[in-house]
Amino acid sequence: MAGPGRFLRGMAHALDLRQREAVDVALRRAADESCAAAAHELGFAQFRFGFEGVVCGALPLAEFEGWIWAGRLMARGIEWLDLDRPEPAAVAAFLDHAAGLAEAPPLSVSGGLCWGALADRPEVDGSGYPFVEELEVMRQVFRTASRGEPLPAGDVHAVAASLEAYGTSGEEPSLPLIHGARTAYQPAHALNTAILSLALVESLGMGAEERRDSITAALLHDIGMARLPAETVEGDHFSSQDRARVRGHPLEGARLLLRQSTPWESAAVASYEHHLRQDGSGYPRLSYPREPHVLSRVVAVCDAFDARLAPRPDRAAFDPVSAMLELERSMAAQFDSRVVSAFSDVVMRHAGSGGLALTSRLT
Amino acid sequence: MMPAPRSSAPRATSNRQLADLLLGLAGILQRLRTLPESHPIVAAGVAALERELEHVMRYRESLAIEVGTVQLVVEGMETNPDFEPLRDLAGQLREAGVKTLEFRPGATQAELLAVFSAVAGNGNGRGSWPVSPHVGLETLSATPHAEGDPWLPFERTVLQDTAREAAAAEPDELAFALEMLAPDPARDGLLLEQLAHIADATSSDVDDREVLSHLLRALPIGILRRLLAPGASSLAQGAFLRAVAGQLSPPLLLRLLEAAAHGRESQLTPAALHVLARLARRAGGPDEGTARRALAEELTRLAPVGPAAESPGQRLAPEPERILKLALESGILEPGTLAAADRMIARRQVAPLLALLQTVPEETPIARAIHQRVFHPDTVRSILEGDPVDLETLDRLIPAAGVEAIPALLDCLAKSRERQVRLRLLDLLPRYGATIAPLAAERLDGMPWYVQRNLLALLGRIPERPANLEPHALLAHRDPRVRHEAIALALTDPELRERGLAEALDSRHEPTLRLALVTLADRCPPEFVPRIIARAADPGIDPELRALAVTAVASVHDPVVLRMLRRLVVARGIASLGRLAPKTPMMLAALRGLAAHWQSHPRVVSLLETARQSRDAEIREAARPPGRRSSGSLPRVTS
């Protein structure tokens, strides 16, 4: 947690300088730059300021207990601060506002910084959806991947642990799925696929190790999509070039996952093989003909099912039962029949009991 | 001469090499406990250790070995506590008060001897060690655990009261005292070990567990971070986190997780902590067990417990060959690709790996990278450690593995009990030519008989004689099999040939005697005649060998020889006058000798004539002059 501490100390220093008169401009600029660099390095973080100190995420920061600037920020109406690699200009604007040198609206969003009073904090439009925080973490994972940086292994493990805890906490849990907006499709799809995979491996009678592996593989199976240009992912029509790029995402994902200092081999294989058909056709094209790995087969079915639940420019979204029937129709050629059969049981059981909950939108 | 490897890219030492180093170290300490420093066995062991170290340190600036009570930690990897030699080594080092052992490149035999003599002689103490620039020892600061109440040693350390006789402090008091202690990495490691011991010893006692929880709750987060900081005693941290992971409440686990994550941002970001914090909040309800398990898992994942042999999910983990196929067909050259290749090598799946490599053009980057790993001395070593050894793959690897593979090959040749493997290596190793001879010669001293035999056999096949080879002592080795190889070597050396022949002709070891007789078959110096005749007359020797002795000596124009040859050919007794003796291998050998070397001697002419008129074709053939014999009738001389 050196990162949050460094950022907060840098912020305090920059604010101190703002409050002093006759401070060299170059010195102030250097302090701003140092604070901005620390904020950028921190990546995604959420702070809450109170009289007792600072909370980062859900953790009180012990070294900032009774921090004088927490009280001062509250007095300026800044009770929370979210940042995601903010731009230096945004940091400078925030510092000006926090130091009382410039006015800003109660909620300010610009260049990767967002702050305000708790009462004004925007809530995610996903009422009833239990994995809002996990979704946020996965967004961050996809953002990291889009920059080609090493994936934050701890984040993925934490989400996987959370999902696993949910899936094994007692009676058969419901399957809470969510559809993101087009711009947030991938993180939501990753979570949905992981939740479906969890139920599927349970149904297939696999053990705890397989469960965890399948969750991780499902969370990361489409990570290669993060490397595609936004216009390709978010566009309504695919050009042939776009199509070629999309067909390259399994390979890009595998490359990213094998690049980690501790390679994610299962996830890399699932990423590479989840568009392969049972007979070895599909993509990418194989030089060494082989059947997809069992994890790839599990992820492929869940991936295809969730994809059908989302609307596309050329078709409306399927409802779960129709999506399942559609999947079964293409089963023989595309998927492992045993896996599809087990998955069908899962979907029909949940659809019948109302356990397959679809949250329709997320900002 | 073999080519050098295409690239000697730095590569981590194999676990096997590290294990060899540790085993070598264990051997040295054991020897030094019973033998004086000057004993040749000790010297040989230290020399071998120096060699292992040189190999292991080739790409390192230092190598730290942490000492636990039942295991060692080498570069984050724990040794198996069930593997007795290394458990004993940990115990010995621990007993001698060694906490950490650090090697740096360049350690000499003298340094190693000085340091480990001090360690071996310091069984009960917390020693002052010899100062060495290349071997560093860190001493344990206090006795790790006292018997009885596990809290007592912890209280003694925290309260700095070594005379304390009973544990009585309250957790808040202990937390405060611990907070007041000045930072001391050695003491922090000890404290964690003691806490781990407390957690282990009190796992079934609810009250004790609550006291431990209370203490950990009372400790400021800064102190926990310091205790769990990266770079501190990883062994103690791992032991502590593993011990408490299953015992503490989720919020406390989260607190430890935050402390352990401090400074390890790349592994656990604030966002991840956020999700885990929610898991902890779920505790108390039906999710308690699940949340606790998930948090404990994350905690042990962060704990520096050393890398797992394989990634989690062993049963479903994709086989490395699948990863490699994926990488080869898409050109993905990343750490995971190379790790998969390494895993195939470690599993000795080298043949399928080579088959895969053959399917891609050799000049592609990925093929080159994998090629370097496969055609590497470590791979040769791995193959050689297989049971059985994959000789076919070995044949393909050695030509490209380069001279760096020589030590591994020599090790295998020296120690292999499989005759087939030794023979194959004896065929392959001489291809290294003069490079290998001094390396083989330097390994001879103090080795067991079979090692010496194998190395001498190798040296016998290399034309170049290394300057460091001193076979004199080995000519008189008490084991006939070593002597045999030493004699074979001596026979190729003009200075040693005579002594070698003398030793061989006196040997009771028939292969050695045969070696001498075959050597002498072409030209026998007269001074050996008495010895050879004596062996020819020895009824305890195989008749074929005795015949060989007769053949060897027959060319020497000495009346004694003639007398012996005639006696073997002519029947004894008055009634048998002028008749040939019964046919035996020796009789035939003598007859051939007479026909070849004594045919014009007056006492031989009529004898040969009689033999040429024999009804026995073999006798007639043996009595013919050599130039007129059919080739099939020549005596068979085998080595």
Image (tube, coloured by chain):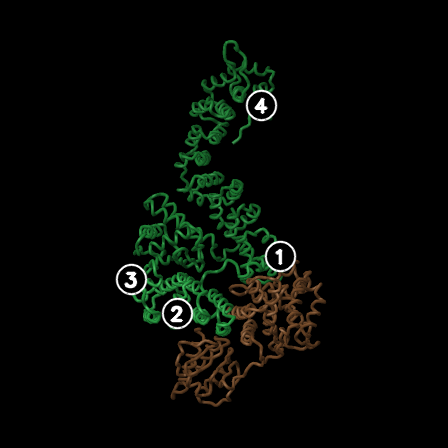
Chain colours: A brown, B green
- Which chain's residue wears label 2? B
Label 3, label 1: how many angstroms apart (C-alpha)?
71 Å
Q: Nearer the viewer, residue A302 or B35?
A: A302
Q: Amino acid at mark 4?
A: Gly
Q: Secondary structure at mark 1?
A: loop
Where is residue B595 shown, x and y percent of the image?
A: 54, 19
B442 relative to B208, above or below: above
Asked if both marks, 2 and 4, belong to the same chain, the answer given is yes
Label 3, label 4: how many angstroms apart (C-alpha)?
101 Å
Label 3, label 2: how many angstroms apart (C-alpha)?
23 Å
Q: Which residue is mark 4?
A: B627
Mark 3 or mark 2, earlier in chain? 3
Q: Which residue is mark 3?
A: B165
Which-is-in-front pick, marks 4 and 1?
A: 1
Q: Is residue B635 visible?
A: yes
Looking at the image, residue B345 sits to the left or right of residue B211; the answer is right
Looking at the image, residue A137 sits to the left or right of residue B359; the answer is left
Label 4, label 1: how many angstroms apart (C-alpha)?
61 Å
Label 2, label 4: how many angstroms apart (C-alpha)?
100 Å
- Disc number at residue B360? 1
Which-is-in-front pick, marks 3 and 4?
A: 3
- Which chain's residue wears label 4? B
Mark 3 or mark 1, earlier in chain? 3
Mark 2 or mark 1, earlier in chain? 2
Which-is-in-front pick, marks 3 and 2?
A: 3
Asked if both marks, 3 and 2, belong to the same chain, the answer given is yes
Q: Amino acid at mark 2?
A: Leu
Is the Cβ of the residue at disc 3 closer than 8 Å to that at disc 1? no
- Which chain's residue wears label 1? B
Q: Which residue is mark 2?
A: B216
